[in-house]
């Protein structure tokens, strides 16, 4: 009975929370097979534009929509979110203002202007053990979060993703 409960919690859903490490039980550094097992659903490969560099995008079969995994060298590197219902462990989500992001992560946001868009708000963890992970919120010109991603360096900082 406990095993069924654990499996039910492990399935990737819109209620799964995003952290600097990934989403739900899917973590940066996992192989596709490990991520499939952790997500409770197959991951389907899509086009990335970076195939010749060993960089691919995968999406969970059957959802949730708006979740994609960058896979580089056979391992999950980042998770990208474009689903308005998925939140971070701190409650940040698409549609939030830059001010809300600052308030959720006080003193830990680095701002970078993005060409022709808004800003990239990068959460930088203070723990030495988390120094190779980031959570990045992309905002529009009006200052609202339009997408976010998390994962390991250097991939999480690739502005163009796999391209």
Image: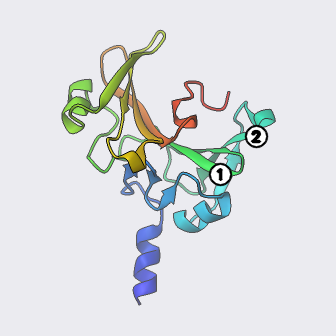
| Alpha-carbon span between mark 2 and mark 1 | 10 Å
Q: Nearer the viewer, residue 154 or 38?
A: 154
Q: Is residue 142 left or right of residue 146?
A: left
Q: Count the marks.
A: 2
Question: With respect to residue 131, does 60 lie above or below?
Answer: below
Q: Is residue 15 left or right of residue 50?
A: left
Residue furthest right as drawn: 52
**Position of the N terminus by quadrant:** bottom left
- In this orientation, does residue 19 appear? no
Q: Which residue is mark 2?
A: 54
The disc label shown at residue 75, or none: 1
Residue furthest bottom as drawn: 1
Q: Position of residue 151 (x, y in %)?
A: 49, 43
Identify the residue at image location x=40%, y=86%: 2
Q: Nearer the viewer, residue 95 or 114?
A: 114
Question: With respect to residue 77, does 33 lie above or below?
Answer: below
Identify the residue at image location x=36%, y=13%: 141
Q: Secondary structure at mark 1?
A: strand
Q: Position of residue 153 (x, y in %)?
A: 53, 38
The disc label shown at residue 148, or none: none
**Label 2 Cα neighbours within 10 Å, binned few <14 / some 14-19 / many ≥20:** few
Q: Decide: marks 2, 1 in contact (CB < 8 A)? A: no
Q: Earlier in the sequence, mark 2 or mark 1?
A: 2
Q: Position of residue 132 (x, y in %)?
A: 48, 42
Identify the residue at image location x=65%, y=51%: 75
**Label 1 Cα neighbours within 10 Å, binned few <14 / some 14-19 / many ≥20:** many
Q: Secondary structure at mark 2?
A: loop
Q: Is residue 136 left or right of residue 107?
A: right
Q: Nearer the viewer, residue 62 or 161?
A: 161
């Amino acid at each position: 009975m406990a095993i069924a409960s654990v499996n039910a919690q492990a399935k990737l859903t819109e209620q799964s929370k995003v952290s600097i490490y990934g989403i739900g039980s899917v973590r940066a550094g996992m192989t596709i097979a490990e991520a499939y097992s952790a997500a409770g659903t197959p991951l389907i490969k899509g086009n990335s534009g970076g195939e010749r560099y060993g960089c691919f995008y995968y999406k969970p079969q059957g959802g949730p929509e708006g979740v994609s995994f960058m896979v580089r060298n056979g391992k999950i590197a980042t998770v990208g979110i474009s689903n308005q219902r998925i939140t971070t462990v701190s409650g940040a989500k698409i549609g939030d203002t830059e001010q809300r992001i600052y308030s959720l992560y006080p003193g830990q946001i680095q701002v970078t202007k993005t060409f022709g868009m808004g800003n990239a708000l990068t959460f930088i963890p203070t723990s030495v053990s988390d120094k190779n992970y980031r959570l990045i919120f992309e905002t529009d010109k009006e200052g609202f979060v339009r997408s976010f991603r998390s994962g390991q360096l250097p991939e999480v900082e690739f502005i163009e993703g796999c391209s």
